[in-house]
Amino acid sequence: MRFPLFIISSIVLVALFTGCGSTSESDREWMDVLPMDTTATSDRTFETRTDTVVAEGEDPADESKPKPAEERGAQYTVQIGAFKNAKLAGTTQALARQRYLLPVVNDYHMQRHRYQVRIGFFDTHEAAKEFCAQMKKEFPAEYKNAWVAQLNK
């Protein structure tokens, strides 16, 4: 591709007159930048420190705070769909998150070649079964095939 001569000459002139690539002393003063020290010294040493902060008022053994599913020993979830199409699985996942404000997992099952969309982590089968029934009651068309699944440890 050929550029017209006036474009190339314009670029060169702009670069020459704007001081492209260099900074003069007056520019450094205007920018409050000190000139770089170019003298090499090998006697410089660097020191690192680590500070530890202890937060007061929080008891790490406080049982009133909810724990993550892994720590609670959650054993059940509700599977709301299995899809070959990744986009459909993603849409189903986003809609379930929006409706229930619970964790929704979209896992790919290699042997079945399916995206499995599951919602919630429950400690008991009964709790998962109740939530599944609630979903089917609120949105019968979307979650009619939902079922309780046991999590693998």
Image (cartoon, helix red, strand yellow):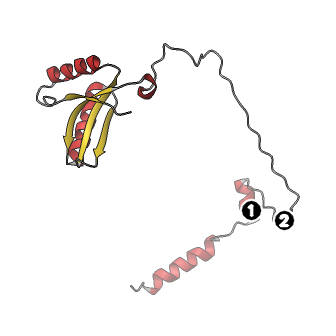
Task: Name the residue beneath numbered marker 2.
Answer: 40
Identify which residue is drawn at 62% across, 76% down.
16
SS at mark 1 in the image: helix
Q: In the rendering, at what x and y percent does residue 126 appear?
A: 26, 17
* Residue 138 in picture, x, y percent from top left: 16, 21
State if disc 2 and disc 1 touch (CB < 8 Å): no
Residue assigned mark 1: 26
Q: Residues within 10 Å of mark 2 (few under 14, many from 20)?
A: few
Neighbours of disc 1 within 10 Å: few (<14), some (14-19), many (20+): few
Q: Quadrant of residue 68?
A: top left
Q: Quadrant of the C terminus?
A: top left
Q: Quadrant of the N terminus?
A: bottom left
Q: Position of residue 149 (x, y in %)?
A: 26, 30
Q: In the image, what residue type sits under mark 2?
A: Ala
The residue at the far top in this view is 64
User: From mark 1 to mark 2, how far is it between C-alphas?
Assistant: 25 Å
Query: Is 121 above or below relative to 28?
Result: above
Q: Is residue 82 left or right of residue 8?
A: left
